Amino acid sequence: MPGNKRMLGVAILNVLKEYSDAEHPLKRNDIIALVQKHYNLHCDRKTVTDNIHGLQSMGYEIVSSRNPSGTYFAGRPFEESELRILIDDILFSPMISQPQARELIKKLISLGGQHFREKVPHIRNLSALPHGVNQQIFYTIDILSEAIHTQHKVSFTYNQYGTDFQLHPRREEPYLVSPYEMVTSAGKYYLLCNCEKYDNISHFRLDRITDIHISEEPLRPVKDIPGFEQGLQLPVRMAEDLYMYSGHTVDVTLETTPEMMNQLVDAFGDNFTVTSEKDGLLYAFLHVNEQAMCYWILQHGTEVKVLQPESLKQKVINAIQQMLTQYEEPGAKESELQTEEAIKDRCEGEKQVQELSFDV
């Protein structure tokens, strides 16, 4: 009997967690019925009331309301909107494999109770959404967390996709790196680290790392890397390294229109300045990774123009010229030259006729 009494308190708490919230409080008779159904325990209204008071005295957030009348559990760690954000992030994350995504979403949904579960039917679409194939992603995160904490290097295989849509090693020899941070950018998860023999920060996609191991060798302090004497300064680096490109940063001046402010803020946050509009144009000043900036400009075509630096302007021009070359038909250049020669010959002929007419 004493054992049943202790179990009864746990059973009532579980019932309130699973079946109640502020919009769906449970009456005493509801609690009695659910406890009997799921735990095969019998109780009366007074016993339920006594157990609820006992749970409240232990710090559980259990509330009794009048309109609507009943009792509900108010101690959930997440609001429904917060759970929805977390679930959707996993649902639409291409880096997590489908089985891992399903299991993680299941755990999050359980935190919301039965009534929350009814509001997220779209998770049935999980199988139709793109997901990664790397089953080691969570193990990789655990190992990296430990290595960063203990300040040790890690070795791993870095992979790329083949035409069979599976991951294959980029090279036979494992990478040996000093890990510093794990960050997300544009929906991808990256490791920021230093590769041996190089004086820079490299980026590796976590969903393409396999066979990771912690080395006994201590990592290279980030402050020993030229340009990082003050540390990684993560907020600044994330703002500058759009798309996680390696390479140097430059001061950029862009000419665009006020309508492009949404795209600028989406990409760079508030890490840039603008000058007052002139003739309907807007001028933006940024300090960003040059290669990433080139890629961003090409995405927005005629909406953005580079004014400075000259090196970035030339990168954009070269990229556009290479793109044009890709779409040239075979023999198109020769045909163009022939057309130019024909026009030139025609112009020369007209010139000779005019000269003859003047002579007459």
Image (cartoon, rainbow, N blue to C red):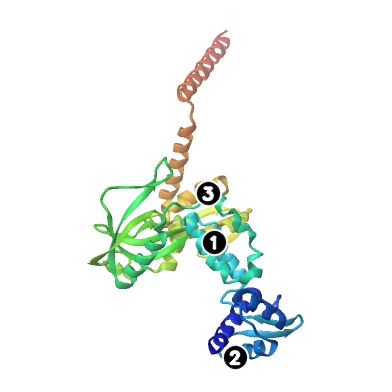
What x and y, as percent, mark residue 332?
48, 24
Judged from the image, the secondary structure of the residue bearing numbered disc 3 is strand
At x 39%, y 53%, the residue is 208
The CA distance from mark 1 to mark 3 is: 34 Å
What x and y, as percent, mark residue 340?
50, 22
Front residue of 122 and 233: 122
> Which callout, 2 or 1, points at the residue further toward the start of the chain?
2
Amino acid type for the residue under numbered disc 3: Lys
- Quadrant containing the C terminus is top right
Front residue of 202 and 50: 50
> Which callout, 2 or 3, points at the residue further toward the start of the chain?
2
Q: Is residue 26 above or below residue 162?
A: below
Q: In terms of image quadrants, where is residue 221?
A: bottom left
Identify the residue position indicated by label 3 in the image: 305
Q: In terms of image quadrants, where is residue 105?
A: bottom right
Q: Residue furthest right?
A: 67
**Label 2 neighbour load within 10 Å: few <14, some 14-19, many 20+:** few
Identify the residue position indicated by label 1 in the image: 89
Q: In terms of image quadrants, where is residue 207?
A: bottom left
Residue 27 seen by the camera: no
> Which callout, 1 or 3, points at the residue further toward the start of the chain?
1
Amino acid type for the residue under numbered disc 1: Asp
Q: Looking at the image, do the residues carrying marks 2 and 3 touch, with CB atoms under 8 Å apart?
A: no
Q: Marks 2 and 1: which is nearer the front?
A: 2
Judged from the image, the secondary structure of the residue bearing numbered disc 1 is helix
Instruction: Tell me the number on the disc at residue 54.
Output: 2
What x and y, as percent, mark residue 194?
30, 61
